[in-house]
Image (cartoon, coloured by chain):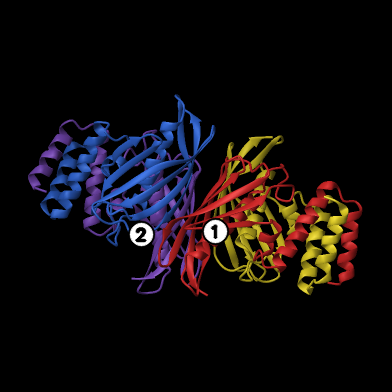
Chain colours: A red, B yellow, C blue, D purple
Amino acid sequence: MKKQDVQELFNQCMEQATADELKVIHQLLTGVQRKKQKYNDSYISAILNMEKFPSDNEYKISIPINTLTDNSLGIVHGGITATVLDTVMGTLANTLVPEGYGAVTSNLAIHFIAPGKGEKMETIAKIIHKGTNTLVIEGTAFCDNGKKIAHCTGTFFIIKK
Amino acid sequence: MKKQDVQELFNQCMEQATADELKVIHQLLTGVQRKKQKYNDSYISAILNMEKFPSDNEYKISIPINTLTDNSLGIVHGGITATVLDTVMGTLANTLVPEGYGAVTSNLAIHFIAPGKGEKMETIAKIIHKGTNTLVIEGTAFCDNGKKIAHCTGTFFIIKK
Amino acid sequence: MKKQDVQELFNQCMEQATADELKVIHQLLTGVQRKKQKYNDSYISAILNMEKFPSDNEYKISIPINTLTDNSLGIVHGGITATVLDTVMGTLANTLVPEGYGAVTSNLAIHFIAPGKGEKMETIAKIIHKGTNTLVIEGTAFCDNGKKIAHCTGTFFIIKK
Amino acid sequence: MKKQDVQELFNQCMEQATADELKVIHQLLTGVQRKKQKYNDSYISAILNMEKFPSDNEYKISIPINTLTDNSLGIVHGGITATVLDTVMGTLANTLVPEGYGAVTSNLAIHFIAPGKGEKMETIAKIIHKGTNTLVIEGTAFCDNGKKIAHCTGTFFIIKK
């Protein structure tokens, strides 16, 4: 990929950009920076501008809700909700395993409850079961008004890194 | 959001951009264009450069695999897999409902099978059950070598738009 | 079915019955009585000798653990655990719907955590979400020593009877 | 448990038994015989009179539908459906593991599709993924008219016996 090609594509985007598109491009580029600075450890986390709040035996992650996160109906895309839930649950899982081990998602069961709307989506992960080979974790996603968007449970395998 | 702020952020990103970051920025901006041109109907679909292949009673979507789709272990992020599966299953579901109706995800159950690797992730959605109030859809994600990455089933509610 | 055939089959069973089989036959016949007396509203609930403990916004059901409930490995059969969880969750769901409505299971996602052992399996159902068209309910099964056997979530449709 | 107590309970049951109850008692006692003769390896399988049909890379189990299998609405109890699905999937799983190993259910995700009615419920299990540590299996339950009752997927752990 040549720098010039990226520059030209950017110029094209900017020429006709709506106010909404400017915000989206800004968030995407902020994401590239966040990933480079290792504030987030994956591009998808970085681009969604995930904010992390660890605490004892729990983990919270929040993201801004806007056109970038929405589906064609103007509510948060179910895949985005699943992504943040998988991330918050997996992050908690990884804090629970011994040194030299990691936790990988074996399965997720998500119930979608209500449309994701408002300024922010907040998610919280809690422990259901902590075993020697597996973890069962619960994740819940909320609107900023406290309404539940989705509820998820997942099994995580504990594996040697 | 001022144009100038976006321009400055872009310049910062470009100054120190690695070859890999140039590719990521190019894909993100291509996504912004794809959304503007209505080639994809949500930003997440556009940014992941989802290619759609409808056919009778089935639907396929594929995305390129690269650093943009990967998690911190260098394999496709489980949330990305979930997002493409939710999209391909929901898209199939929406082709099956009568005029004036839509299909929304009620729940998803995803089994993660093997790491997503290679150049492309291909997904296919099939009908398990087509009822008057609900649909049950199956989605499978594959590496380009044919290996299964994940298997998913979901219930979709049929609602009046 | 002639009375005499049932009597002969019973005699056969009794002739060679081990102590364990006597207990099983006694529990099965107790189940037939419990169903007849409407103490339980289905044969499976009656035969498993389900004891019900309703309370505000929660529901508990317990069953005795013995050879009748065990699988070939000598631990509670996963299907029995699923049956009690489905029953306790569905029973709670049905207490939450308006007069003239019922709740039917749309889906269940069960994580099996540890072997069901001991004298009793205790289950508890709690509300995750109470909507106008659906309910999301959580169910947990425990050994009598407090160890979790399984965790389940389910969506229930609210339908007119 | 004394023989005499069982005999007395049986006599009580028989005195007032309806035609339907006679059939139920006969099926239950047949189950006790089937378990004793090792035709079925658990009481729940024996009492439900599960018939097994192994074949290459698939497994089928069918049960008679009657008052014994029904819930209070007169359709097959969701827990019974879950039990037969868990059994057929687990039985297939156990045919796929090496000598000295067993397969145990890690999780099940069941979508209930239509009421179980008719004379028989037929279930079939198929392989979704066969790995070295886990298996992903699919199970489907049908009425004898071919209508789907439920669809299930599950992850099974392969463990040393």
Alpha-carbon distance for marks 2 and 1? 28 Å
On screen, C88 above or below D98?
above
Q: Is D108 left, or right, of A71 in this rendering?
A: left
Could you tell whether A92 is left or right of B73 in the image? left
Residue B123 drawn at (x, y percent) = 65, 59
Query: Residue D13 versus residue D153: which sits nearer the camera?
Result: D153
Q: Are marks 2 and 1 on the same chain?
A: no
In the rendered image of this protein, does residue A49 appear above or below residue C91?
below
Q: Of the residues shown, which amino acid type is indicated by label 1? A: Pro
Q: Which residue is mark 1?
A: A54
Q: Chain of mark 1?
A: A
The residue lying at 82 percent from left, 59 percent from top is B30
Secondary structure beneath dot 2 equals loop
Residue C114's label in the rendered image is 2
Whole-percent x and y of residue C30?
20, 40
Q: Seen in the image, is B27 located left or right of residue C3?
A: right
Q: Chain of mark 2?
A: C
Q: Amino acid at mark 2?
A: Ala
Viewer-proximal residue among B30 and D140:
B30
Packing grade of label 2 (10 A; few <14, some 14-19, many >=20) is some
